[in-house]
Amino acid sequence: MDNKSRCDDLVGLVLDPQTILPLMPEEKVRTLLAELDMIMEDYTRDIAIMYIASNYSSKKHLCSTILRGKHDHEIKEAVAKVREVLVEDLKERKRK
C-alpha cells in the first residue's frame, strides 16, 4: 500500500460531510458551498483547516490534527472532494 492511499484513508475517516449534510436545510448547504468557494479563493492554510474541520467533520479535533499534518495540495484536494459532495447533495435535493 502506498502512502497516498494510506493518507487518503485517514482524511476519509475524519472528513464525513455526507453524514452531516442530510441534517441541514438546503439554504445552509448553499451557504456552506459559497463559503467554501470563498475560503479557496483567498486560501490561507490555517483558516481552511479550521473551516473544513468545523463544518464537515463529526470528529472536529481529530480532523484538524490530521489536516495540519498534510501539505497544502492535500488540503486543497480534500476541499475539492467536500465541494463535490456539496454539489451532489444539492443536485439530489433538487431532484426530490
Image: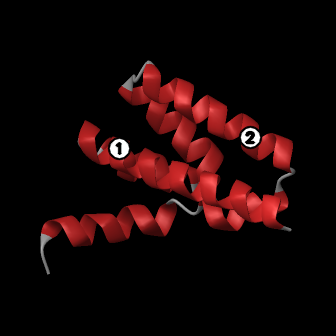
Q: Which mark is residue 29?
A: none
Depth order, front residue of 1/29: 29
Taking the image as shown, residue 5 lies to the left or right of residue 34, namely left
Residue 92 x, y percent position in the rendering: 73, 65
Rendered position, 52 above or below 84: above
Taking the image as shown, residue 20 lies to the left or right of residue 41, namely right
The residue beneath circle 2 is 30
Q: Amino acid at mark 2?
A: Arg
Name of the residue lying farthest toward the left: 2
The residue beneath circle 1 is 75
Residue drawn at x 80%, y 42% is 28
Residue drawn at x 35%, y 41% is 76
Quarter of the image holding residue 46? top left
Earlier residue among tags 2 and 1 = 2
Taking the image as shown, residue 65 lies to the left or right of residue 29, namely left
Q: Would you call the spot at circle 1 few (<14 residues within 10 Å), some (14-19), or many (20 or more)?
A: some
Rendered position, 1 above or below 7: below
